[in-house]
Image (cartoon, rainbow, N blue to C red):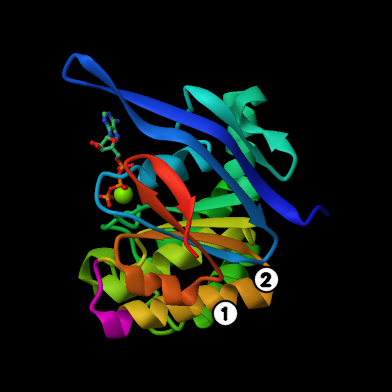
Amino acid sequence: MSNIVAIVRNLWKYYIIGNTSVAVLKNVNLEVRRGEIIGIHGPSGSGKSTLLKIMAGLEKPDQGEVIIEGYNLNLLSEDGLAMIRTNIVSYIPQDYGLIEDFTVYENIELPLMLLGLEKRERHIRIMELIDYMGLRGKESIRVKYLSGGEKQRVAIARALTITPSLLLADEPASNLDWENAKKVLELFVKISRDFNTSIVIVSHDPRTLEYTYRRFEMFDGILRPLT
Ligand SMILES: Nc1ncnc2c1ncn2[C@@H]1O[C@H](COP(=O)(O)OP(=O)(O)OP(=O)(O)O)[C@@H](O)[C@H]1O
Ligand SMILES: [Mg+2]
């Protein structure tokens, strides 16, 4: 197993805004080492979510490449990308990506169904994750009734169903007050220690960086290391 989980090389992404093409990622380079937590701080609109979505194989770059556990995402078919998302990379979207009308249990169950696990196996895994995330007692509550911090923990539980090599967290703390944000960020530190998972956390709140080991700043599509 290589010590490098992900390589982002010379990445460019353009969007057509109005009738002009605007570069939102400008030659972004990044290496993610196994088990580390990377923090990317940057203002709204600087390209953070775009970078994470490309690293998760959800969007395609216009130039450059992303290599995850040796797989060059540019060379994969849709099925190949789906394999990466169900086995190697978990992306937690900025808006949690949960189904609000489903219960906590059902939201965590969905990816396990996609993996083809039997009901009994699913149940064991779901209850493990519910305990791990401190959600015991909330299993049958519909997600729409949860607090922001609880929703974020369900989103993390769902992302952990596969024990990913790489966890991409898009603004995991931004909708929370700082006390709850800290609890979520401490959970990421615990996850990286417990599972040797590499984690990339993007945020416009610089306090998030305290919980990361290697820090970068994204500004107007350009990624720079922070010293
Ligand atoms: N699908 C799209 N089509 C056109 N423009 C887009 C699209 N997605 C993002 N953009 C633009 O790209 C730029 C970067 O967006 P992105 O969501 O990556 O920023 P961000 O750093 O995550 O911001 P925030 O902190 O507000 O989440 C923004 O100007 C945005 O309007
Ligand atoms: Mg964003």
Regarding ligand 1, which quadrant of the image does it lie in?
top left
SS at circle 1: helix
Q: Residue at x 51, y 73 (%)?
A: 188
Q: CA distance from mark 1 to mark 2?
A: 8 Å
Residue 195, labelled with which disc? 2
Q: Amino acid at mark 1?
A: Lys
Density class for disc 1 (Cα within 10 Å; few <14, some 14-19, many ≥20) is few
Question: Percent x, y for residue 114?
Answer: 56, 46
Q: Residue at x 39, y 84 (%)?
A: 137
Q: Quadrant of residue 70?
A: top right
Q: Is residue 73 magenta?
A: no
Q: Is residue 176 magenta?
A: yes
Residue bearing mark 1? 190
Q: Nearer the viewer, residue 202 or 217?
A: 217
Question: Percent x, y for residue 53?
Answer: 44, 41
Question: Percent x, y for residue 33?
Answer: 68, 58
Q: Amino acid at mark 2?
A: Phe
Q: Magenta residues?
A: 175-180
Question: Percent x, y for residue 35?
Answer: 67, 66
